Each structure stands twice: as C-alpha cells, then as structure tokens.
C-alpha cells in the first residue's frame, strides 16, 4: 500500500497550476490534460483516473470554464472512435447529456461532439434555448434527443468518470476558497487587528480544512477503484466540504465576497452548480447505502 | 498510489482475525470501571499477551510483534470488527509506551514495558489538574528535590482508570521559579506509595471511570523521571500527539460502529428518514480509515505527526458523537435501555479529553493554516 500521490503526480499538478496561473487554459493541451483518458492508439496518454483527479482538482482550483468533464473525463469512455484523436490534440470539445443527472448540455454551441446518453444507446441532440445557470460561467442549453448513432462503449463507466471529475473540481474549488479565506483573514483588519486573530474566524476555518482533508482520501480511493460506492462516498463528502468552504469563505470575506467584482462569488456559485451535477447528494447517498 | 496489501500483510491480518475469532471471551466483560470488570479485563489482556496480540507494534523483546504501522491499523480493524473488549491499559499502551520508546532509558523500558504488555501493571494518566484542563502549562503540582529522588505534592484530576490502576504518569513543576511550559518534569509514580490518596469520581454512567489523585510528599526515585529534568513539556508532546492522532482512536473503532449502525438501520426496515445520517456516518468512518492510510504512508516515508493530529481528533470526535446520536434516534424509545446509550455517553467525552475541540481548532488554525496567534 502506498496511499499518497506520487512525485510525478505532484509535479503534474504543479505544472497545471503554473500554466493556469500564467497563461490560462490555452496551455493545457500541451500538458496533455485533454489527452489523459484517450487511448494511445488515438494519440492519447491512456492515463489512470487518479491522474484525471489530479488535473481536475487544478481546473477546479482555477475555476476554468468549459465542458472539460464532458470532453476529457466522459467522452473517452463513451466512444472508441477517431474523434478522440481530436480530443487528445485539444481541438475537439464534447457536450454530453446524461439524464436524469445531467439534463442540460454545457457549451453545446461550441461542441463538435454532441451526445445524448440513453441507456446503452448514444444519440445526437439538437441544442435549444440557452438557460441561465446559477454559475454565470456555465452556459447550459436545452437538448432535444435525435437519432441513435450507436452503442456507448461503457455508459456506466462514463458516468462514474463524470462524477469523479466533478468531485475533483469541487475539491479544487474548496481548496481555493479555503486558501483565499485564510489569506484574507491574515490581512483584513477590524477593531485594530487582523480578523484571523479572532477565535471565531479561526474555528470556522479549522472546520473547513478538517472537512476538506478528510474528504480528499475518499476521492483518491474512488479514482483507484471507480466502484459506484466509492465514487458516491467521495462526491457526498467532497461536495459537503466544498460547500462549507464556500459558505465560510463568504462569511470571512463579508460584503466584499458578495460582489460580482470579487472572485469569491464565482467559486461559490460554481460549487453550488457542481454539487447537483453528475448525481445529487441524495442520489449518491442512496447509492452508498444500497451497496452496504 | 494504491491500497493493495502484500501477501505478508494479508497473512498477518488473517492470523489476527482467526485468533480473535477463536479466542474472544464467550460473554461480554463487565465494565472495566468496576472492580470485577477490571479484573476480567486484566485476564483478557494476559490472554492477548500470551498470543502476542496485546502490543503488536512493539519490538518482540517487550512482547510485541514488530508490526508495522499499517499492520497495527489492520489489527485494530480486526479487533474492533470482532467486538473484542476495550483495552483497560490503553493509557499505558498508547500514551506512556510511545513516550518511553522515544525518551525512556533502557532500564525504564525493560522494567516497565513487559508488565504493561500483560497488564500486570495498569497505568493511569495524571495530566489534568483542577485549574488546568487542556492548559497543561498551568500545572501547579510540584516536585521537590530530595535525597535520591523527588517529593511529589499536589492534586491531579479526571484521571481515567485511576480508581483501579497501579501506576500513574504525569507532569510536575520541578522548578518553583518557572512559569508556563518551562520547568516541568515527566514522572512515573506508584499509586500504592505512601502519601498517595486516590478518590474515585463516578462518571455519567455512574461507574468510577475517573479519579482524583492527591500527592502528599510522595517519594519517587530518579529512575522514574522520563527524559531530562525540566524538559517534561517536550516529552509530553510526544504523548499528546499520540493521543490526538493515530494511536488512541484507530479507524477500526468507527468502522465497526458504522457497520453496526447500518445493520441496525436495516433491522428497522431501512427507514428513509434516517438514510442521510446513516450514509454520512458510514462515509465518515470510511473517510477516517482512508485518511489514516494516508498518514501511515506519510509516516512510513519518514514524515512526522504534526498539527494534522488535531485535524484527526476534530474529525473523529464529531464522527463518534454523530454516529451514536443517529443510532439512538433510530432506535427510538428502545435506545434508552440499549447498549448504544453507553457508547453515546462515551462518545460525548471525545470532544473534551486529549485537548478540547476548541483547543484543537485553534491549533489547526494557527499551526496548519498559519493564522496569527491572538487571545485564547
């Protein structure tokens, strides 16, 4: 047993972090992020789900918009097709509807691959009206299913990977919210001293780091097994931890955190959107219990 | 990254499982906070020790199996899953022993550890004082130099197992001019020595789980000082991290309780109204197990237990209470007379002993998150 990330994985995370800090999502294809789960015969990396977790944690930390879960995590499990070579090259985007868990299509207007998962069948869909998400960076479209175009390679695995990648994004979001709330508490003064000196603030943040730290190993274990029980346990715990990081982060920031000009709000609304994406808390809790 | 066990580790775990299955007492032992139960638990400990299962992580020369940290965690999982008795000497085995391994002399180790392994000598922890709970640095009990040793004076309280234990370990102020963390020395004392008075204090369950210990010119020899004179605080920190961190609350305990809770919920027809709480309790126990595997890996690679042990304690103390509260609510009026209520009473002590939740949160905030120190 060696239950910790390898040096290579830590280095990979650091490269993504540096890339997103400096240049934004443009450099991600060069680092191989879209190619992670694409098989080697389509010029992909054939990497493991744990590497996907490492990458999506960083995408969440930097709140990168776009259909990354659909394209990078889910599509390679649905198809065994040349189109994956385009994904690996960072040229092809996918938008996937997986009802009832994913009822609307993210960034459908920019996606080359528009798939509607219907049991084991794959259909295309026609994008309809643009909806307004609680997360302003998520452009969701209504989807009208069309013709069956084939069988899904592994629809069940695709779902687990979608939930796993979403969970990793939530962990990254939670980490950002914690880091920035801690930084703010060290700098912001009230009544003549940093608010981080007050026990009330300290204890809120201590609870957030406790929740995040104890949720993280569930995510890693889920990546190792991809068993439904493990994925669901991780999604429940990480989503709860990220949400508490968001609520606490807003409380620590006070009114400035409630403004559109501050980056905290975008994280808070993204956390809320991802909590119900790829399986609600209720769905995932039920799946855990049914497995016991 | 992997969670796979190698063949030798699996063999170790299976041997523990088989032994426990065939050697568990055929009935539930009386509480070790009663005289009868204490004697029964000593017998059980001797049986464990005969098969070298009482202190698996210790070196074999002291009765252990040289087990790795991972093997110890797996042994604990088996122990709790089997429903084996609580460890009457846990304060000695999990708090004093690690201190002796780090700071004790060879003579102390040879004199104390083998008897501890068999619970021939049961140890009580004498940390707290009436005016100093989690604030160990406010201790007022004194140690005064005398011919060949020290005279201990003062009062300790909330000392678990002390009503029936043989010995105690704790900190005394050896430099009368000192304040706070300086000038404290770590002593071991015989609870039957002249000048010691033990006054049992009944706990919420009515049994004398606690005691006050009064020291009135109690002589202890120099050989009963652990570490350097005046360095007791540093020595004690080894023990405190053990108490908060890995050793006292192994994940096996919560996994076993979570599995029992799921069984209880199934037996009651899996009522929807409790589903979320049952799921969260099980997920919490699983999270704690996996977090421990991460800690085991980190320690095996040369890492140290730092402020993470406070994260650990905050998590399990909440988990334990939530788990038991869920069980009581699920059982309804039956819970009043069920064993779960005893477990619930015990769980309520978790957020208090070994440093309160409030102390742990402050430690996490200042030492892990780097927030500035301020008023306590």
Image (cartoon, coloured by chain):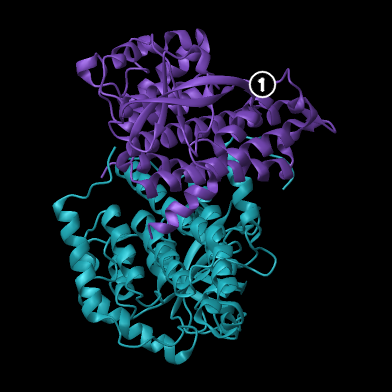
Q: Is residue A17 above or below residue A229?
A: above
Rendered location of residue A54, percent (x, y): 40, 28
Q: Residue furthest bottom?
A: B36
B41 to the left or right of A66:
left
**Residue that carries the numbered disc 1 in the rendered image:** A263
For chain B, give the colour.
cyan
Of A252 and A228, the residue lying toward us: A228
For chain A, give the colour.
purple
Rendered location of residue B365, percent (x, y): 61, 41
Q: Is residue B20 above or below residue B238?
A: below
Of A250 and A74, the residue lying toward us: A74
Other-residue count near label 1 (Cα within 10 Å), few / some / many at <14 / 14–19 / ≥20 = some
Q: Residue at x 62, y 35 (%)?
A: A272
Q: Residue at x 45, y 75 (%)?
A: B267
Q: Residue at x 32, y 58 (%)?
A: B73
Q: Is residue A18 visible?
A: yes
- Rendered-image quadrant of the N terminus of chain B: top left
B357 to the left or right of B236:
right
Q: Residue at x 42, y 15 (%)?
A: A93
Rendered location of residue B110, percent (x, y): 27, 68
């Amino acid at each position: 047993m060696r239950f910790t990330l390898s040096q290579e994985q830590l280095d990979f995370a650091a490269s993504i972090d540096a890339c997103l800090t400096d240049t934004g999502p443009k450099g991600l294809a060069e680092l191989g992020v879209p190619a992670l789960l694409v098989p080697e015969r389509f010029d992909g990396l054939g990497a493991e789900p744990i590497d996907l977790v490492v990458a999506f944690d960083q995408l969440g930390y930097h709140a990168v918009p776009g259909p990354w879960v659909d394209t990078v995590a889910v599509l390679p499990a649905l198809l065994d097709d040349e189109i994956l070579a385009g994904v690996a090259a960072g040229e092809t985007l996918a938008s996937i509807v997986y009802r009832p868990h994913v009822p609307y299509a993210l960034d459908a207007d920019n996606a080359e691959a528009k798939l509607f998962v219907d049991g084991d069948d794959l259909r295309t869909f026609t994008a309809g009206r643009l909806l307004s998400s609680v997360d302003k960076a998520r452009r969701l479209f209504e989807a009208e299913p069309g013709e069956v175009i084939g069988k899904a390679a592994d629809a069940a695995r695709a779902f687990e990977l979608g939930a796993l990648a979403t969970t990793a994004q939530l962990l990254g979001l939670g980490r950002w919210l914690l880091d920035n709330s801690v930084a703010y508490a060290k700098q912001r003064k009230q009544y003549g001293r940093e608010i981080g000196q007050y026990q009330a603030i300290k204890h809120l943040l201590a609870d957030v780091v406790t929740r995040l730290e104890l949720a993280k190993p569930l995510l890693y274990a889920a990546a190792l097994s991809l068993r439904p029980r493990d994925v669901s346990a991780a999604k429940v715990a990480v989503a709860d931890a990220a949400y508490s990081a968001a609520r606490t982060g807003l409380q620590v920031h006070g009114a400035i955190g409630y403004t559109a000009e501050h980056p905290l709000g975008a994280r808070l609304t993204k956390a809320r959107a991802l909590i119900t994406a790829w399986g609600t808390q209720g769905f995932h809790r039920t799946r855990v219990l049914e497995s016991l | 990254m992997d969670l796979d066990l190698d063949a030798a580790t699996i063999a170790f775990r299976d041997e523990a499982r088989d032994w426990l299955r065939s050697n568990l007492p055929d009935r539930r032992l009386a509480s070790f906070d009663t005289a009868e139960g204490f004697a029964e638990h000593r017998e059980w400990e001797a049986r464990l020790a005969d098969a070298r299962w009482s202190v698996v992580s210790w070196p074999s020369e002291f009765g252990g199996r040289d087990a790795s940290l991972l093997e110890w965690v797996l042994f604990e999982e088996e122990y709790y899953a089997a429903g084996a008795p609580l460890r009457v000497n846990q304060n000695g085995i999990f708090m004093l022993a690690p201190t002796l391994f780090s700071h004790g002399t060879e003579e102390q180790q040879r004199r104390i550890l083998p008897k501890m392994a068999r619970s021939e000598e049961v140890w009580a922890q004498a940390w707290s004082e009436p005016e100093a709970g989690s604030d160990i640095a406010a201790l007022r009990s004194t140690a005064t130099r005398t011919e060949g040793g020290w005279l201990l004076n003062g009062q300790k309280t909330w000392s678990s197992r002390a009503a029936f234990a043989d010995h105690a370990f704790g900190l005394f102020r050896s430099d009368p001019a000192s304040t706070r963390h300086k000038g404290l020395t770590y002593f071991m004392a015989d609870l039957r020595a002249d000048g010691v008075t033990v006054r049992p204090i009944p706990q919420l369950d009515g049994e004398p789980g606690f005691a006050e210990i009064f020291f009135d010119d109690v002589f202890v020899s120099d050989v009963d000082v652990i570490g350097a004179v005046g360095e007791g605080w540093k020595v004690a920190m080894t023990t405190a991290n053990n108490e908060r961190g890995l050793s006292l609350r192994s994940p096996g305990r919560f996994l076993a309780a979570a599995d029992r809770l799921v069984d209880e919920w199934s037996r009651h027809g899996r009522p929807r109204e409790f589903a979320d709480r049952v799921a969260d309790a099980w997920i919490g126990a699983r999270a704690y197990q996996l977090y421990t595997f991460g800690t085991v890996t980190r320690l095996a690679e040369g890492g140290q237990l730092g402020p993470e042990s406070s994260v650990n304690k905050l998590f399990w103390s909440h988990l334990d209470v939530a788990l038991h509260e869920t069980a009581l609510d699920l059982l309804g009026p039956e819970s009043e007379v069920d064993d779960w209520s005893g477990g619930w009473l015990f769980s309520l002590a978790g957020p208090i002993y070994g440093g309160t939740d409030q102390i742990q949160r402050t430690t996490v905030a200042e030492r892990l998150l780097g927030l500035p120190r301020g008023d306590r």
